[in-house]
Image (cartoon, grey):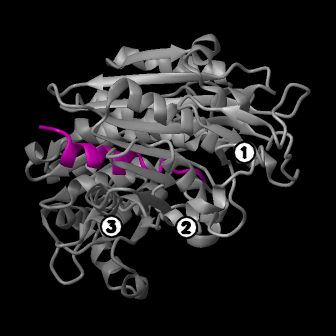
Amino acid sequence: MTRPAAIRVLASDPADLAERDGVIAVFVDPEGGLDALARRVNKLTRGGVEKARASKAWEKAEPGDALALSYPAGLAADAVAVVKLPMRAGPVSARKAGVSVARIASDKPMTLALGARKRAAEVILGAVLRSYDYADQRSRPAGDGSAGAGGDPAEVVAMVSKPETVDGATLSAVAEGVFFARDLVNDPANVLTTTSYGKRLEALSEHGLEVEVLEEDRLAELGMGALLSVGQGSDSPSKVVVMKWMGGGEEAPLALVGKGVVFDTGGISLKPAAGMEDMTMDMGGSAVVAGVMKTLALRKAKANVVGLVGLVENMPSGGATRPGDVVRSMKGDTIEVINTDAEGRLVLADVLWYAQETFSPAAIVDLATLTGAVIIGLGHHNAGVLSNDDAFCDRLLGAARAEGEGAWRLPLGKEYAEQLKSRIADVKNVGGRPAGTITAAEFLHRFIKDGQAWAHIDIAGVASTSFDSPLAPKGATGWGVRALDRLVRDHYEG
């Protein structure tokens, strides 16, 4: 398990900077003078900060970029990061500033000399999130200080003028949720099986969540034939895990639903071998739900939220579902399975129906690495969002925008649903190549009751990347944990 750095928020103390180890970051407004903290570091380094600000590299630097002064005389620190950041910088530049410091620090402790910066929390969060390093599968000795290798992660100390204005506990809770989601996505499929995943989610009860695991016999009783059809070719048992956080009053909960396909071969509609190893991330939607639920519990959110994830493995075998088979959903609709590689929507159909039948939620958000089509349309920088409720969708998009997590709305419509008509069943699970992301959402829309506010988020392009994303190294991003936590904070906490 990868643990985020501990966050300590202290009152600004220029006299304390000389003895700080690791990396000290000072923040310089390109249009203004040095604050007291930066002046102290500049004096101790014999004008090093001013020299950096006078360099050509500084002229070319964008807001949030940093220059490194290595092994500065006069300081115990290994390096000073001189960060270009206007006093009125926006949240994106502030988070970028934290990322820049973390890149210089690597696994060393960081002291962020923020002083009176109004975006201190964003800087801190950027630094903590970018310090993530998945190391659970590496042969490192325990206790070497690496975040994923059993040692204590490096500390982040923030010096600010008014410590009471920065909620370090909430920042830590968000980081814990993001790291949890990233670890789940990065875990290989022989480590994160449906069984081990279920146990890991059950362990969240130690933070106050109420967790229930529905096993295959119970799923069969409930009539979840669509979900069960996906996992019937695997030796790993299918499960639905329900996580409840009831920190609000008597109001109906927000429901978060996640696709948890721990490995996706495509089933009988087998995927090409090239790139199949990446299908360990096909449970990315469930990881986001789990990460949000952990964050809400850790920060004791005053809201009612229920997280539901369907955990399955899609494998080819003599018992696997065949193309052309017809399965019956919990709702009662029959589904012609045209392509067994369009399995996530079968999982979500049953879990969405169960969520509505059991909890009568105020609104539902489902998340899934559902279609390759969303990557063709939006690349790796925006998730696709589709919704039946404009006001709810606007709140969701606003939360994503506030957290700098790219999201773009795509349309729904009956004309797209027409592509899903089946000759022999109530519906088929694919509608052809045109508008593949939209027809997948329309399939899910069929399992949303009239009047139920709902949004579907296709995170296939953003859950894991082959390049460094803004706040993470390549691999799992944890996209969506911060946006959904913000949605809860802004609209569901009393």
Which residue is painted at 36% across and 45% down in the image?
A: 450
Q: CA distance from mark 2 to mark 3?
A: 38 Å
Q: In front: 352, or 281?
A: 352
In the image, residue 350 above or below residue 393: above
Q: Earlier in the sequence, mark 2 or mark 1?
A: 1
Question: Residue under circle 3?
Answer: 92
Q: Is residue 375 left or right of residue 203?
A: right
38 is higher (above) or lower (below) than 326: below
Q: Amino acid at mark 3?
A: Val
Query: Is residue 485 covered in magenta?
Result: yes
Most foreground residue, 242 or 336: 336
Residue 317, image x, y percentages: 89, 29
Residue name at image x 57 percent, y 50 percent:
443
> Mark 2 highlights which residue?
415
- Give the label on residue 63, or none: none
Q: Give the residue furthest to the front.
A: 423
Does the residue at mark 2 contact the one at mark 3 (Cβ under 8 Å)? no
Looking at the image, is mark 3 or mark 1 earlier in the sequence?
Answer: 3
Three-letter code, disc 1 = Met
- Which quarter shows the C terminus? top left
Q: Residue furthest right?
A: 318
| Residue 398 part of the magenta segment | no
| Label 3 Cα neighbours within 10 Å, binned few <14 / some 14-19 / many ≥20 | some
The region drawn magenta spans: 474-494
| Alpha carbon distance from label 3 to label 1 | 31 Å
Disc nearest the viewer among 2 and 3: 2
> Which dot marks residue 279?
1
Question: Mark 2 or mark 1, which is nearer to you?
Answer: 2
**Viewport quadrant of the N terminus:** top right
